[in-house]
Image: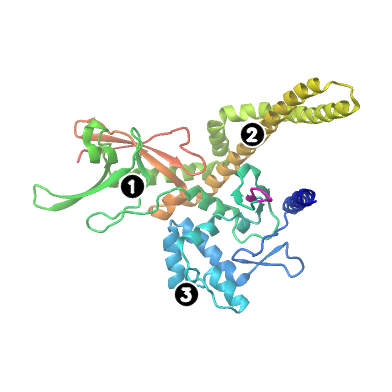
Amino acid sequence: MAVFRNWFNEQHSRTTSVKVKAIKKMQAQDGKFYHAYAPYGYRKSSQTKHLLKIDEITAHIVREIFELRAKGYGFNKIANHLNNSKVVSPRERYYQQKGKDNPRTDGRFWNGTTVKKITQNETYIGNVVSARYASESYKTHKIVTNPEEDWIRVENVHEPIIDRELWEQEQALNGKRYIKRPDREGNLSIFSGFLVCADCGLKMRRNVSRAIRKNGNEYVLKNFVCGAYSRSGQSICTAHYISENALYELVSEQIRSHARLVKCNEKRIVESILSQQKDSAVAGKKTLEADFKVNKQRLGTLEKVIEKLYEDRVAGVIPETVFKNLIEKYEVERIERQKAHKDLELRIAQLSTESNNTAMWVKQIKRYTETETLDAEILLQLIEKIEVHEPLKQGRQRTYRVWIVYNYVGDLARLPGEKTVAHG
């Protein structure tokens, strides 16, 4: 009896687990928020606990975090700013609302990890993302992270705190290095972290030195050189030297030039960028969509074939050995088709995103048609990186060659910016 009782209990646990997972999946697909706590900046609706409403008391803090991040602030710097401003941390606020003391001392203040989680949470643009985690088994209850393609994402469920443009700016800045290393005099360069050597791909180093002219006047030389060359010499790479003044003029000039072109004829520029970026992709979109349609039809056919095979086996129409061979064959194809279906869906979605990215870049760069002064915030908003090539020397003249890779649109077909200046 004990054996049968254990078997029955296990089957009951398995069935209950399946039912609970099915209910949660249905809720997730409906865009219902079923987590225990509302994210910082939101509160649960008084009508239904599955809908989020903006908490005006804390929502402005979330906006400030995203705005500071878009200006290039690091996570720890933002946390320090909030602590200095006496802003109550999310965990501390939770316990205050409960009328209890916070038992965790590490949760009484803001930290970089908390800020980072906020800037990566899609809830703030109105989305509900579920199924990011799952239990490994109804027996062990171990929590595992699901792959991103298995997440359930429902958009525009509730009112967003952050607009899409600010969100995209923050996501574009992810992975960039924000730590600016000062020179020996303690000064920072707005270009630090943006420059890379076009040949070896390593970061450029900033050098500041002083020299005396023949007339006795002192002057300061500020330039960038390849990091590999600076460390190991010509055995690894060459100098790729570029003066900071020349770089400043070149980048300013190209930003203004692109901004004016966009302002004069936005439609033509957008079409030009899209054609450069997606020449083959746009041409292949119809093929992708056709493949997607064929694949979907075949998946439907396979479902019917597999169902019919099971019916025939039960009815004794086909032998067991034939059934096993056929079902194995069709199951393998079905799994492969499902994977291909997801891949095609993702590739088609990416093509649509590129068009949105171009519109985002156009909207941003139009602001800088008359920009005379560059700063770190402008560079962070517009530029992903600047590739510096070996300068071309002709006597005492030097031609600096750089390729500016912009956020959202890349390097615009690798159009070079050039500037010729006197050597030294």
Direction from residue 13 to residue 252 in the image, left or right: left
Tell me residue 140's x, y (percent).
Answer: 64, 51
Q: Quadrant of residue 351?
A: top right
Compare residues 59 and 338 and report the one nearer the observer. Answer: 338
**In the picture, which quadrant includes the C terminus?**
top left
CA distance for labels 1 and 2: 42 Å
Q: Which circle marks residue 343 in the picture?
A: 2
Range of the magenta residues? 133-139
- 59 lies left or right of 180: right
Choose the circle earlier in sequence order: 2 or 3. Answer: 3
Secondary structure state at the residue bearing disc 2: helix
| Residue 218 visible, this angle | yes
Q: Provide the residue designation for mark 3.
A: 86
Q: Which residue is mark 1?
A: 248
- Specify the amino acid type for callout 2: Asp
Q: In the image, is 378 to the left or to the right of 158?
A: left
